[in-house]
Image: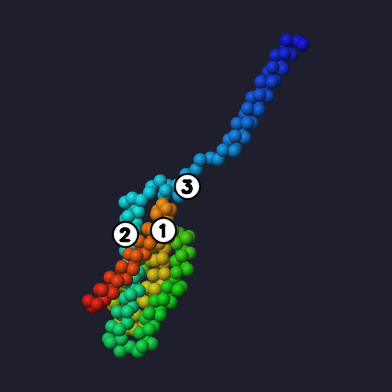
Amino acid sequence: MNPSEVVGSTQLDSEDLNKSDSSENVLDAEKKPNPTYTVEDAVEAAGFGRFQLKLFILCGAISAADAMEMLLLSVLGPALRCYWLLSSGQVAAITTVVFAGFLFGAPLWGFIADRFGRWPTLLIVLSMITYFGIITSCAPTYIWVIILRLLVGFAIGGGNSRLVFLNEFRKFPITDGYTIIFLCLTNVQFYLTCILSTLY
């Protein structure tokens, strides 16, 4: 065999080895998944801190506003009955329209929260509850009370996003206990509203 042939065959063998090594490296790279860092991983790494505590207080305030608006009906109905000499059906209608607004508002606000974000939705909902709640106190006639209470109920339907919003920023192992504490504090707000109504 010629020396040039030996050199040529050696070069071919080395090229084949390089190609096989590079193909193995490509296969290994394809087998190994790329490291990713998801939002869930970030929440897990963040743990429970001041941000979650502030969020808990904020969502608790939203829950308190919802609870007081709902329980306000038990005080508003008898007061308006004496002031405007309303019938039992008219007093019942004040409560009915709030839950009717809630019925139509909840699915719509849920869609809006999923589409555009829960935080902007909660800001809009809180603004509506505050605005229509204050305007209700200035309502000149019974019809205006019905309309404004309907709009308040419609806005309250979007307040349920607060619990989902709260759960999105918590570690999974403490989610259940955290939710139970939040719901217990919501019940305390109901009792507080009842106590405040006795002062009226």
- Can the viewer see residue 17? yes
Mark 3, residue position? 38
Mark 2 to mark 1 CA distance (whole Å): 17 Å
Helix, strand or loop at label 3? It is: loop
Q: Residue at x 56, y 38 (%)?
A: 32
Mark 2, residue position? 57
Residue at the farthest left position: 199
In x, y percent, where is residue 110? Answer: 46, 65
Quadrant, the C terminus? bottom left
In x, y percent, where is residue 57? Answer: 31, 59
Tell me which corner region of the image, top left, top right, bottom left or bottom right, holds residue 199: bottom left
Residue at the farthest right position: 1
Q: Residue at x 40, y 62 (%)?
A: 163
Camera-side mark, 1 or 3: 1
Q: Amino acid at mark 2?
A: Ile
Mark 1 to mark 3 CA distance (whole Å): 22 Å
Name the colouring of the figure. Answer: rainbow
Q: Amino acid at mark 1?
A: Asp
Establish if 181 lies above or below 39. below
